[in-house]
Amino acid sequence: MTLSGMIGVDVGGTFTDHVSIDEDGTITALKIPSNPTSMESSVLEGARALGVERKAAFNHASTAGLNAIITRQLPKIACLTTFGHRDILDMGRAWRPLEAQTDPHWRRSFGDAARPLVPRYLRRGVEERIKADGTVLLPLNEAQALEQLAVLKRCDVAGVAICFLNSYVNPEHERRVAELVSEVLGDVPCSMSADVSPLAKEYARASTTVVDVIMKIVFKEYADNLIGGLHALGFENQVNFADCAATLAPESFALRRPFRLVFSGPAAGTVSSSYFGDLSGEPNLVCCDVGGTSCDISVVTRGRPIVNTTFEIEHDLIVNTLANEIATLGAGGGSIVSIGANGELRVGPESAGGDPGPACYGKGGTLPTMTDACLLIGILSPEGFLGGKMKLDTDLAQEAFERLETNLDLRERVRHAYNLGLNHISEGILDITIRRAIDPRDYALMAYGSAGPMLLPAVLDEVGAKSLIVPPYPGLFSALGLLSTNLVYTDSRSAYVQLGLDAADRINGVFETMEEDLLRSTSTRREAVSIQRTFDGRLMGQTWDTPFVDAPNGRITGDAIEAMIVNFHTAYESRWGNRFESIPVEGVTYRVQLVLPTQKVNYPESDILEERRPDAVATSVLRFLEDDDVEAHEYERERLRSGDVIEGPAIIREPMSTTQVCKGQRAAVGRHGEIVITRSETEL
């Protein structure tokens, strides 16, 4: 594979971003409005324009399955559980969000009283029981199982999830019932928890298996349409899908366990930030992807994103997959400005999306948004949006604000709406920094997404970060993340084992089995990959785990067990602040990753010879931000060079994004073309 042969595509709620790398390393970018009724059509439109038939790899991230789950536009599926446990999907973990602790009317969004993924009548109990040690307590009642399958056949279900108690230890009953499903229901998608997520904790295993069945139906249809469309365009090479940690896997491997693909787009932005931060010498980042619909916030510390072992689609709706930790706010360029029940001005979380979009798009939208506010202020250019391919209508934006039922005049409406939207973003960033116990003064903000460079400089002071970085191609930075990551094959399995000399053979068997299975299923040679082992452990008696503890490669011996124990105590102390070496350690989940390094995007580097003040190409007027209008110099990013310095207020325009340099700020162009915004020395 050559670098010139790669395309990365990130499908968002408002736009679909395409990035291609040509033979000489030149980056070509496209931004196309997403089509919510046919998501693959916008992907194929951009692929055609970029000459996909000449490429060697097509890397893709999408939220197609996630959108189906959130909106409940789902196929009719069934769930088979151990008799007496069919309500596990309704009960969840019995955790309430903080705001609902004292609310007697609160219900889970996926519970039977709200919008369940699987209605109760399609959750059927099967008479069987396996104990925690894998021995059979109650044999499988095949006659009773066939009765339940006959009910599902009459209900015409499109897929079946199977999750029995303790099947991760002994999958015998699940495998037999899967055979019966095939005999009775034919060729319907069927997922067994022992294959999908052979991990402890019944509810998370059950919800993951249900999501896997949904993704097999919903996402596979999307993937089939996409791959068929690519073939029609003449592309016959490798299609890779990104997972929730933005690592890539070939289409054949990824679609075996499609639950891992449920939330890949925002994760790609975090990986892109980590990769670019390493190049530019900035290892500590708060990453902010502000698009048309939402603001996705994540943290990179010492060059590594924070990764969790689960992903939460909705509160308490858990998927067992490695996922970059990302907080999503309903704050973006398309956030709708409205009047609340008490007459107060509100911004978000509702969004105008890409269709009809903000009022200024002229596509039928009548509600004012943050994009309309930025257009009226003068930050956005009516003629230069999307590189001049799309005109924005200032009159429609003004009419939308004037229709708001409030006594505020136009200046106050626009100013307060703009400030409210910024406040939502700054609060979200501060919430993340407090939750992760980091000092924002030690971190830089990475601003990307179409609206990130436009809005985030205005919150730099409130957040307290040391600087703000606008990378090259900020409007398509998540798509670039798909060209900044590796191919990774992952497997994990649970086994409750107290770490000691007598546990070495059992743990060695778990690791070796996973490695051999991955190497065989991916047709990968051991010498071609880097093998990374980790485990999740806990102190004996605890009910929660400390994840991602390093484990030695090779055969697990007594010395390796000792190393695992030491590594656990070190990881525990780093995460929780205490060290209890006198308490035995119990291994819970064991994980293997085969990492196949790939070529990555190359950001050209230039030497900074001397500081230069570039000439402005125009002057614009910023209205409504202050009592009086403010003049701001305009610059074209493609004309800027490393070492250029710009004092705010200023606007830097480029085809896919607009960067605002606020009053009292200073922007400097770095070695890789990044714009670094700091407080001006006169303001310090």
Image: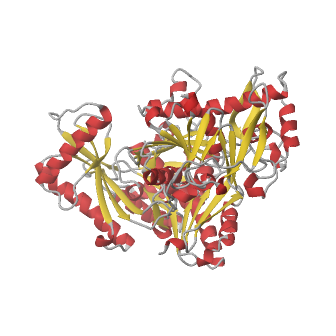
Residue 144: image location, x then y, percent: 44, 54
Residue 171: image location, x then y, percent: 34, 57
> Which residue appears at 57% of the width and 58% of the height?
479
Is residue 68 visible to us here?
yes
Relative vertical location of residue 245 with respect to residue 251 in this rendering, above or below? above
Q: Is residue 633 toward the left or the right of residue 305 in the image?
A: right
Taking depth in this image into account, of 231 and 58 the one nearest to the observer is: 58
Residue 483: image location, x then y, percent: 51, 62
Q: Is residue 233 toward the left or the right of residue 618 in the image?
A: left
- Color theme of the render: secondary structure
Relative vertical location of residue 29 with respect to residue 85 in this rendering, above or below? below
Is residue 139 visible to us here?
no
Residue 453 sits in which quadrant? top right
> Which residue appears at 13% of the width and 56% of the height?
557
Taking depth in this image into account, of 476 and 594 the one nearest to the observer is: 476
Taking depth in this image into account, of 498 and 44 the one nearest to the observer is: 44
Residue 37: image location, x then y, percent: 72, 57
Numbered marks: total: 0
Taking depth in this image into account, of 480 and 152 the one nearest to the observer is: 480
